[in-house]
Amino acid sequence: MSSTLPRLGWFALALLGAVALGVVALTRGEPVNAVWLVIAAICTYLIAYRLYGLFIAEKVMSLDPNRQTPAVRYNDGLDYVPTNKYVLFGHHFAAIAGAGPLVGPVLAAQMGYLPGTLWILAGVVFAGAVQDMLVLVISSRRDGRSLGDIIRTEMGPVAGAIALVGVLLIMIIIVAILALVVVNALAGSPWGTFTVFSTVPTALIMGIYGRFIRPGRVGEMSLIGFVLLMAALVYGRTVSLSPDLAPLFTFTGPQLAIIMMAYGFVASVLPVWLLLAPRDYLTTFLKIGTICALAVGIMVVLPDLKMPAVTQFTDGTGPVFSGSLFPFLFITIACGAVSGFHALISSGTTPKMLENETQARFIGFGGMLMESFVAIMAMIAASVIEPGIYFAMNSPAAKIGTDVVSAAAAVSSWGFVITPDMLAQVAKDVGETSILSRTGGAPTLAVGMAHIFSKVIGGTAMMGVWYHFAILFEALFILTTVDAGTRVARFMIQDMVGSVVPAYKATKSWFNNVTGSAAAVACWGYFLYAGVTDPLGGINTLWPLFGISNQMLAGIALIMCSVVLFKMKRGKYAWVSLFPTAWLLICTLTAGYQKVFSDNPAIGFWKHGQKFADALAQGKVLAPAKTLEQMSKIVFNDYVDATLALAFVLVVLAMCFYGVTGIIKARANPKVTVIEVGGEVGHA
Amino acid sequence: MLEEFKEFYSRVKQTSRLMVGIPDYDNYVAHRKTTHPGLPVMSYEEFFRERQDSRYTRRISGCC
């Protein structure tokens, strides 16, 4: 009896989830309420956690409550601290949650909410959560070492070096694309620009307060910062309406790109306590708070999804990103389904604080499920606004023109009826001059969030404040990623150059600091600038590169997990990581191949570059370029992008090779060949 | 009830601080006193600075 009741409960939960998914998937013609999406997601997560998570914990990895974790073995009260599992869950979630799960689903909504939702749910259960948990356990059994280190010791030095190059490329692309999202959100928006700019003096005040006035009082600092930020948010409206002040904060995309680069450089060179750390505090608390508020908002408002379940753009002709559902949906939504970046966190701070190995399921698997839920909420926010508005915001100007009349005509011709008045009205409601071609996902998400929040508090009158609050929230944590990413890229460059010129490794040297930061900024700045000046709207070009790189890293991490499973002589369970590895490799390699070699110039960088190069040779100018100079710029950018996509493909293939040889070697050896620490208590 | 609330509040506080890379200071002090008696213990201000510097000089951190 005692075991029947819980079983009945789980069965009922499975049934509820199936019904909810059925409603989401099968309803046609009438709007589906967002609550069905939420129920389907939560039931999926609970069942996956209870069954698959437990299976991985008990059978695949044999988590052992008696095995000493690095936190216990090296407890120093600083880096290695046995930490309560709920506290550590919060830390881990705050570290993995960022712009990725919010932006990807918004872009993927061009194919309708259904394909993206199904991939988010299936991806997280079979790939994302598995990767995060396996890497966490594997790192925890190796003193909390990093992904690069583990690959080096388990798969050899060459594989380790290739993985490191891959990580550097990802850092560069991720910073460039996220900076581009912010630039697109702020271009021509004095309210948004003023609010986001004011975060810099706010952070400086917080930094000085927390360093000299009341050292280390994080709560007080953050409260001061929050109050200043909200004041800036409200005052931003006044700025945007003032004919004197508004022009001071109205910039074009290229101007903002230059400002971002200058800012990234300064933030990387300045001491961390002055700018980076205080902004990080604000970002983290605002991020967690807003995510919780969005969850509450959706549950209170219970909005209808206006986006169709599936649109005609699954065929690859969509305006937001080019390419058909397979493989491009699976790289557009990276974080939220599976994100290679998490492998860096799961082999970073978290394994050093794990109190007990068995908690890896709650923190690794559970943390990723939570992140997936953020992606589902982003999908909901993008789908509750009128599809016509969604497409007007996310299509490049090359496709819809630059005024409301042409945009409304173009979008309506795709079957998403919208009038010029409605487009103008939305812009007015959110306090912007225009919402057209605000690509990058952040502004769309902000409109969706404003739509939901204003139904709880304030109505239409508050739309503008909520919209800019959402923009601020996104811009803030993206800028923190830009700062932190620039620093990380700088350290990696210093490390790489330092292996040839050892003096360059010294991180305290002023010369190294300045040149290293400049090199890091130049790398991502190039892609940012190319993206901003790209007539097709850089998101269309660059987001696939970001997706490919992120999924590539996930593929690398999962290859490593598979090799480790074979070395542990647990090959019979290796399908747990081999299956998602295979899927990710198929997706990234197909997408990478198409981005390089596709005959369709809308997809293939090489073909696109050739088309423009041929025209250039004949002295012709092709739209959207306006001058011959722009033409040659497009050709150059295309070739750089093609080279980068090819580099990603080669990195994946090389890691595949080392993975396969590693597995063959492990299978040939009858002994366990894995290099773990702390199998028995006191063994270390 | 009050005890439970206090416990909950302290957990929330601890979580918030760890989210930004500052582990529990009391735990650090307790650890130094029990495992390294007689050795110097950083003041809270020193501890805070040390943790802040360490968070951003780590080789890889991320957010996605």
Image (cartoon, coloured by chain):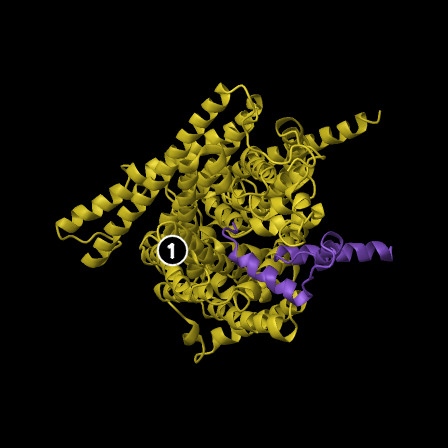
Residue B1 drawn above or below residue A256: above
Give me the chain that's yellow: A
Chain bearing tag 1 is A
In the foreground, A404 or A492: A492
Label 1 belongs to which residue?
A524
Which residue is painted at 24% across and 46% down in the image? A609
Residue A491 pos. (x, y %): 44, 55
In the structure shown, which secondary structural element does the residue marked by tag 1 occupy?
helix
Residue A168 drawn above or below residue A664: below
Give me the chain that's purple: B
Residue A143 pos. (x, y %): 59, 42
Which residue is painted at 12% across and 49% down in the image? A618
Residue A350 appears in the figure: yes
Query: Left of A542 or right of it: where is A235?
Result: right
Which residue is painted at 43% across and 54% down in the image? A489
Query: Left of B27 or right of it: where is A536?
Result: left
Residue A473 pos. (x, y %): 55, 60
Three-letter code, disc 1: Trp
Residue A669 drawn above or below residue A480: above
In the foreground, A255 or A603: A255
Q: The C terminus of chain A appears in which quarter of the rendering?
A: top right
Q: Return the residue found at the far front.
A: B38
Query: Left of A268 or right of it: where is A129?
Result: right
Q: Return the residue found at the far bottom.
A: A244
